Each structure stands twice: as C-alpha cells, then as structure tokens.
Image: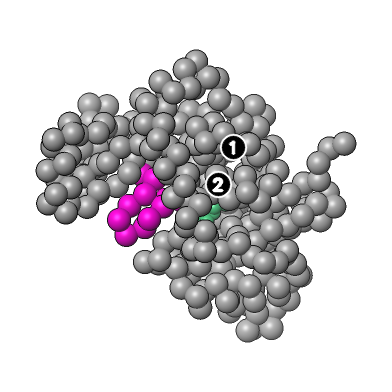
Amino acid sequence: MTPALVTRFAPSPTGELHLGHAFSALTAWDAAFAAGGRFLLRIEDIDATRARPVFEAQILEDLAWLGIRWETPVLRQSEHLADYHAALEDLADKGLIYRCFRTRADVASEITRAPHGPSAAVFTGAALPPDAEAERLSRGEAFAWRLSLTAARRWLGPAYDALTFQEAGRGPAGEQGTIRAEPDRLGDIVLARKDVGVAYHLAVVVDDARQGVSHVIRGCDLFEAAHIQRLLQALLDLPTPVYRHHPLLLGPDGKRLAKRNGAPALRALRDAGETAEDVRRRIADALAAS
Ligand code: GLU
C-alpha cells in the first residue's frame, strides 16, 4: 500500500503573508486534499531576532481565510530547540562540524577574493588548531558551528557522491526526476550561531522526519536547499521525502513577488473584501503572466 501523502506549509513568522505565500500554501493544501493525505502547518520561528507572535497569529488567520485546515497542535520550532541541539550534538560526536570564528564580513570578503570569483565560490574551512581555538574561546569570542563537507565526505565515503533526491516538481532550471545531491554547491553551511541557536536546514530536516512528511512542497527558491538537506538526512540517518518545488509568482517587474515590489499582503486583500476564490484567481493570473 502506498503511504498517504503528508505535506506541510512551513512559514517563518517574520512578516505578513502575500500572494506568493498563498500560492505555496494552497499548492500543498490542494495536493494533500487531492491525495486524501495530511496537511501540516509548521511555524519556523527559530530566529528569535526576527520572529514575531503577531505575524504568527496573522498567518493562522490568513490560512483559515484561504479555506486551509491543518492538524493541531501546530509544531512551533521554538518549542523544540532541544531536539535540534541533539541533532547538532550527534553531528559533533561524528566529527562533522567545527567552530568558525569568522564574522559574516570576513566570510563575505574571503568569498569575493576567491580565485574563481564570488559567483563560483562558497565558503569551506576547517577547525582551528586546538590551542588557537581554546585561546579564542577563553576570550569569549563568538563562533558559529559549520558543517564540514570534507568530514561529511569522509564519513559517508562513496555514498557522498551517490546521494540523490526525487524532484516531482521542477527546480529553477527545469530540473526533474532523480537529482544527484550536490551539497558542495552550498559549501560549509552554518548550522548554529550565537544569536540563532540552530539554523534553518538542521531544524527542517529534523522536523520533516519527526512529522513523517512524505512530500516537501515549496517554492523553487528552496531547490538549492534540498541539496544540503539531503546530505543532512544521510548524516543523521533520517528519511528523505519527495521534493516538489513549484514556480515562484513574479511581480509586474518580472522579479519574484515580494512585499517590496508591491505584492499585496493577504490581510489587505481580506480587509478589502476579497475572498479565497479571488486569491486563487489572482494566483492563476500571476502564473499566466509569469
Ligand atoms: N521557513 C521557510 C520559509 O519561510 C520554508 C522552509 C521550507 O519550506 O522548507 O521560507
């Protein structure tokens, strides 16, 4: 028996939802509905410096107004930090992460100076020698935990180059079907920082597994993320869902729809008396124009 489709919409409560978010949420909701599957809502509020309860409340109102229904309780990532730290510790025990003391500005300037130019460059590094590291720790210097792709390659052996995921939608360049995961496209990503205890990629793979998500349905701006998330699943012995990336709605300027290029907030549409059907019509029009 094929297991029922389980999918999720995972907004970060850092602003108001607009038409692009409605498209994403409705795509996942319609897929679950059509398959007689399950639709989950996950509030990705691990970045306490940006997440706001007021936006979370508004997200629930907007989604209900769109006709979407979700299972309760809603998973709120800020309530599961211990689980993400356990995953981080698992990676640390396997020797797969290292402390990086560079500031974001240091990393940006190193990437700019890379031999093949900034577009081809991603950051890769290594742990400092133990005495140098101990000294910086004793000075109380801030650091980020980075995933070491070199260590990951060593840990997985030949399996590293054989990692794949299924793309049931399309990537930004039309990628479909079995895709070879290329984590090196993202480099040694940050998995935890001082201000944000755990990074998006780690929390997402832990939660997609915990919630039994069979299909990750989301915008193709996150297609690249699947490459590194596939690696994290392998390193943490977690299952890999099917990915179904959908196109992004474009604004009148041909750029991805966003607040700054005039995407109306769902709340504004609601206040103006529009209905969920009007939103679906707007989405169809925007897709036709893209
Ligand atoms: N929280 C992410 C966002 O709002 C989405 C994560 C995902 O769908 O994997 O962009």
First in sequence: mark 2 vs mark 1: 2
Q: Name the kind of residue labelled 2 in the image.
A: Val
Element marked by disc 1: loop
Residue 62 shown left or right of residue 141 in the figure: right
Instruction: Report x, y in % for residue 80.
Output: 52, 59
Which region of the structure is painted magenta?
190-201
Residue found 50% across the figure and 67% down from its top: 13
Residue found 47% across the figure and 17% down from its top: 157
The answer to whether residue 199 is magenta is yes
- Residue 138 vs residue 188, the one in the foreground: 138
Residue 277 shown left or right of residue 120 in the figure: right
| Above or below, 53 relative to 87 | below
CB contact under 8 Å: marks 2 and 1? yes
* Res 225 seen here: yes
Element marked by disc 2: helix
Q: Name the kind of residue labelled 1 in the image.
A: Leu
Q: Residue 238 bears which disc, if any?
A: 1
Q: Which residue is mark 2?
A: 206
Residue found 41% across the figure and 52% down from its top: 198
- Residue 41 vs residue 186, the one in the foreground: 41
